[in-house]
Amino acid sequence: MLVAPFLKRNSFSRRGFIGPIGDDLPSLVPLVISLLLFFSIFTLTLNTYNTKNFFINKQIEMTSAAREIKGDSLILNMDQFMKKCRTVSGKNFPYNFMVGIYGADSDLRTTVSDLLDLQNNGSNPNNQILSADLAGSKQNYFCVYKHVGALPFTQNAKTAYLLRYYPVAVQQAITRTVNGAAVTEYLIIPGVMAMVVWE
């Protein structure tokens, strides 16, 4: 009689069995959290890298354009300056830009507003941007390039523009009378080329 209960087939409760995934759930939770953490950090790092890379490429493009405009840092005359500006513009430069040449002793704190006034009104209120006398009319050493349909630059977009300065020298022709004859002499003026680039 005592042997019968041991020989009898016992049925065990299946309530503790959840399934293959359920049994492994405690080990899957840290794995899923680790993967989420990895991909979140990876995405954040990639976005930071792309942002920095875009900013560096923008600065490289700007430096390249500035080098082409200023050449060997000696601006011979207004025609040469404007021709170089048009050359950069004609190469489908990817950003909008304004360039102005200041005298070396100018107050550069008003650069952005000076360039804005020249862009919008054609005026140089602080008279700091150098000018050339062409056939009796003064023309400022200033050029601007905007893409078709590009919005005009405004000071409200302070976070969206780059401002850089490059040393240059500008040659100015001076005509004076010596012994009754007109003599042309050339004066080299040290200056600073200011360049603003925006999208």
Image (cartoon, rainbow, N blue to C red):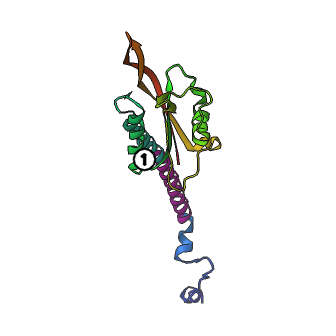
The foreground one among 138 and 30 is 138
Q: Is residue 19 magenta?
A: no
Residue type (three-letter) at the residue carrying disc 1: Ser
Image spot of residue 134 (x, y percent): 46, 31
In the displayed orientation, state which residue is furthest to the right.
156
As drawn, the residue found furthest toward the left would be 72
The location of residue 88, given as percent across then percent down, is: 40, 44
30 relative to 76 in the view: left or right: right
Q: Which residues are magenta?
A: 27-52
Residue at (44% x, 42% y) in the render: 56
Q: Residue furthest top?
A: 179
| Camera-side residue of 178 and 9 | 178
Q: Point out residue 2 in the picture as x, y percentages from the top left corner.
A: 59, 86
In this view, 170 is above or below 120: above
Q: Examine the rendered structure and indicate whether residue 96 appears above or below residue 132.
A: below
Q: Residue at x 61, y 76 (%)?
A: 16
Q: Label 1: which residue?
A: 89
> In the rendering, at what x and y percent does residue 103 appear?
50, 23
Quadrant location, the N terminus:
bottom right
Splitting the image into 4 quarters, where does residue 188 fall?
A: top left
